[in-house]
Amino acid sequence: MRIYETFTLHFERAAKEVARLDGNPSLASVYVSRSTWDRWMAGEIKGLPRQATCRVLEHLFGEPAEQLFGPRHPGVEQRTDASATTASASIAGNGPQMAPHLAAMESFRLADRQLGGGHVYRSVVQYLNTVVAPSLFSTADRREDGETAFGAAVVLTEMAAWMAHDAGRDELASGHFGRALRLAKSLTNVTAGANVLAGMSHLALQTNEVHAAADLARSGLARLAASPPVPALAARLHAMEARAFAQLNARGEAQRALDTAREALALAHETPAPQWVAPFDEAALASEAASVLLDLGLLRDAAQEAERALALRDASRVRSRAFGQVTLARILLAQGQPDAACSVGMELLNACQSVTSLRLSSQIELLQGDFSQFRQVADVRELLSRMAATAQHRRLLLGSLALPEGPQ
C-alpha cells in the first residue's frame, strides 16, 4: 500500500475520533485530497491548512500544529480553500520555506513511526530513485542545493535501511547503510557520516554483532570529533557504545559510556543538530539506558529508566512505545513481578496491532517465551492466549507487506 493511501486510512480514523471527542460531527468529514498531497510532495504548498485539519493532525501525531508546521513566516498567505486541508503540509516539519526533499524526509519519518517500515519502505525507495537521484546530478550551480540533495539522499537511504531491518531484511538494510555511508562522503559536514555509523552500530546490536557495534560507535565518535559539537549525535553514539559494553559484560565501561551520553544530551538544547542527524532525545536515551541496565542486572534502575522512557514518549509514537513496553515487561519479569508485567503486556498488544514491524513481532515472541515461565499465574495464561492470537494476526499483516527481493 502506498504512503498516501496508508496515511489516508489513519487520517480518516483520527478525524472520526476527533469528531467524537469534540462533539463536532463535521470534523469526521475532513479529508486529504490526492492532488493536495502531490502538490505538497512537489514543494508547491506554503502555509497552514484549515483549522479543522490542524485539529485532526494534532490528534493523529500528538504534536501541536506549531511544531508540525514550523513558525508562520510573515508574508506567507494562509490558505483557506478546501484543497489546503492536507496532511502532507502538516508533516513538512520545518516550516513553509523548507526544501521539498527535507519535507519528504519528515513525511516518511512520521509515517514510519506511526505505521512501521513495512508500509513505507517502497515509497522511500521510489522517492530516492525518481526524485532524489536525478537531483544529485543537477546542473544547478548553487552549492546549497547540492548539499541539500546529497543530505536528503543520505538520510533517506539510511531511513530505507531501518525500514528494511524493521521488515526483517537485514542484508538489504546493510546494503542501504553502506550506500548511505558512501553518499555521506560527498557532504562537507562530516556529521552525516557519523550519523550513519550510529545507525550501523545500532543495527549491529540488533543482529548480535556486539564487537562490531562497539567499533562502529567508536568510529562515529572519532569522525564527530573532527566537526563542531553535535551533542545529540554524540549522546546516541555513546549510548550505542554503552549497549555494546553491557552485552560484553564490561560493567565499568558501560556505565561510563552511559554517563557520558547523559552529559552530552544535557547540552543538546544549546546546539541544534544538522537536519540530516536522526532525532535522539531524552526518551530515546532513557530507552537505551533501560536496556543497558537490564543487561547489567541493575533491575531497579532499569525499571526506572524504562518507565521514564514511556512517560516521555507520547501515544503517537506507537512503535517506540511498543519497544519500551517490551523492555519494561522483561524487567518486571526479571524482578519476579508477573502481574505488573501482564498489565504492561496487555497495553502492548492493544497498542501495536497496526504496526507492521517484523522486529517488533520478534521481540513480542521472545517476550512470550519469558512469560511462559510464569504460566501458573492466571493472568499470564490469559496474556499468553492473547499473544498467540496476536502473533497469528501479525504474521498475516506482515505477509501482505513483504519487501521485494534483490538490491534496491
Image (cartoon, rainbow, N blue to C red):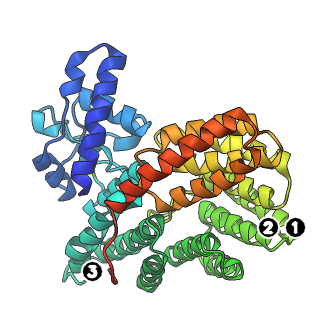
Q: Position of residue 280 (x, y in %)?
A: 57, 56
Q: Mark 2: few, some, or many residues within 10 Å (few <14, many ≥20)?
A: many
Can you say which quadrant of the picture contains the N terminus?
bottom left
- The kind of residue tagged 3 is Leu
Seen in the image, is 371 located left or right of residue 336?
Answer: left
| Residue 43 visible at all | yes
Could you tell me how far apart the alpha carbons at marks 2 and 3 are, in whole angstroms? 41 Å
Q: Residue at x 24, y 43 (%)?
A: 8
What is the spatial separation of the Cα atoms under label 1 and label 2, in whole angstroms?
6 Å
Could you classify mark 1 by the number of other residues whose Cα lies within 10 Å: few (under 14), some (14-19), or many (20 or more)?
some
Circles 3, 1 touching at the beta carbon (< 8 Å): no
Number of disc labels = 3
Q: Position of residue 186 (x, y in %)?
A: 41, 84
Quarter of the image where one finds residue 369? bottom right
Q: Nearer the viewer, mark 3 or mark 1?
A: 1
Which residue is depicted at the point 40% across and 40% down?
A: 61
Where is 155 relative to 337, above or below?
below
**Mark 1 or mark 2: whose residue is earlier in sequence:** 2
Question: Residue lying farthest front?
Answer: 376
Of labels 3 and 1, earlier in sequence is 3
